Amino acid sequence: MDSMDYVAQARELLTAHPVVDGHNDLPWALREQVRYDHAQRDIAADQSAHLHTDLARLRAGGVGAQFWSVYVRTDLTGDAAVSATLEQIDCVDQLIALHPADLADARTADDMEKARAEGRIASLKGAEGGHSINNSLATLRALHELGVRYMTLTHNDNIAWADSATDEPGVGGLSAFGHEVVREMNRTGMLVDLSHVAATTMRDALDTSTAPVIFSHSSSRAICDHPRNIPDDVLERLPANGGVAMATFVPKFILPAAVDWTHRADDNMRANGFHHLDTTAPAMAVHRAFEAENPRPIATPATVADHLDHMREVAGIDHIGIGGDYDGTAFTPSGLDDVAGYPNLLAELLKRGWSSADLAKLTWSNAVRALRGAEDVARELQAQRGPSNATLDQLDG
């Protein structure tokens, strides 16, 4: 079978078992580029000049459900972080309202299945970083009421109650309040997302969580030794937990040769007065100039497939998924350039002998099962106890 036949087979499979993608930063890109002016970035039109994401490319990529990140940067703190998160949530709600034929508001596993049956893209929300709740369990519950179905415990910096993968050790994983956050997420039915967190935080969260956890966009540390990736001992715990590790496509997390290059590119961005995660047009011009002088190592679908092969071997086929991180990264792999690229990854996995049943778990059923598991645990816990009103000061002193 030639490569085009594998791609055709992948596209056919995706019609029945579309991709649940764990993480897409379109809302932040819309905030940064046009301050949520949807007329300027109408995703019903081709946005390939500005974004990784639009409706036509989501359809071409076989996406059936998307966790839209309602991320806010960690330099937004306190109430400013909360209000910015609310604006991000509102952005997703506006997108759904603007495109009802294509996007369906989804808050449960049943909603995801219903959207698939209707031929619409189930649209869920994921908060990225515990700074979004400003140390308030009531705020956590309010985000859940607004449709947020996972929270990544940290982003790139530590918070008062949890350590990040890309910061110096602080509380040594989760503090007492951090464990209470995880328990309250279990009680509400919000998935605990362990992307971005330190390995100590991963282990502490798994010790505490009685519901499935996810990694919304993380790959294998054994394949690429980057702190944003998942160690094997953590992957080994997913079967007992029921959780899902969703492999990301970000080159600096998956291709060892890209790690050093990215450090230098990030330093160049800061030297030119830009945040290293900035993907606005002026920032990307700086990136491109650096790339012209310093050729970038290129990842491919095979790079991602290497991670998925290993993650499958360690965690099992029932505990892996996909989280591209589109519109949250300046660079993407060749062949996975935007949200239309998922068939190329599935084609690579088909070449490696993955069965259609395996791929259906990877793309759709594993993620749906994890959310359903969180819902089941929440029903049980709500029958046992009410909301927690514990505070950071009470538990951590």
Image: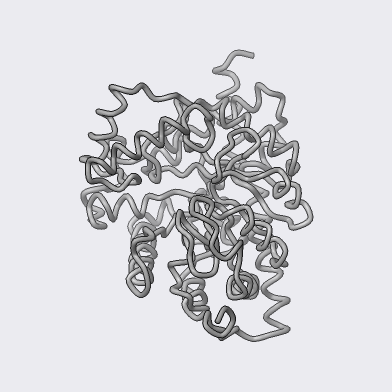
Instruction: Using the image, determine if residue 128 lies above or below residue 146.
Output: above
Dividing the picture into quadrants, the one containing residue 290 is top left
Residue 239 vs residue 290, the one in the foreground: 290
Residue 214 vs residue 208, the one in the foreground: 208
Q: Which residue is drawn at 59% across and 51% down?
A: 215
Taking 349 as reference, is 43 left or right?
left
Residue 364 vs residue 71, the one in the foreground: 71
Q: Which residue is drawn at 49% across and 50% down?
A: 166
Taking 309 as reference, is 123 left or right?
left
Q: x, y percentage for residue 115? A: 54, 55
Q: Residue at x 49, y 26 (%)?
A: 257
Q: Which residue is drawn at 33% across and 57% down?
A: 98
Looking at the rendered structure, the number of numbered marks drawn on it comes to 0
Q: What's the colour scheme?
A: one colour
Query: Most extreme residue toward the top, as rendered?
Result: 2
Dividing the picture into quadrants, the one containing residue 229 is top right
Instruction: Using the image, determine if residue 92 lies above or below residue 8.
Output: below
Q: Evaluate whether residue 150 shows in this view.
A: no
Q: x, y percentage for residue 243? A: 69, 54
Q: Quadrant of the N terminus?
A: top right
Q: x, y percentage for residue 265? A: 34, 34
Q: Evaluate whether residue 160 shows in this view.
A: yes
Instruction: Using the image, determine if residue 295 lies above or below residue 141.
Output: above
Q: Quadrant of the C terminus?
A: bottom right
Q: x, y percentage for residue 160? A: 49, 69
Query: Most extreme residue toward the right, as rendered?
Result: 240
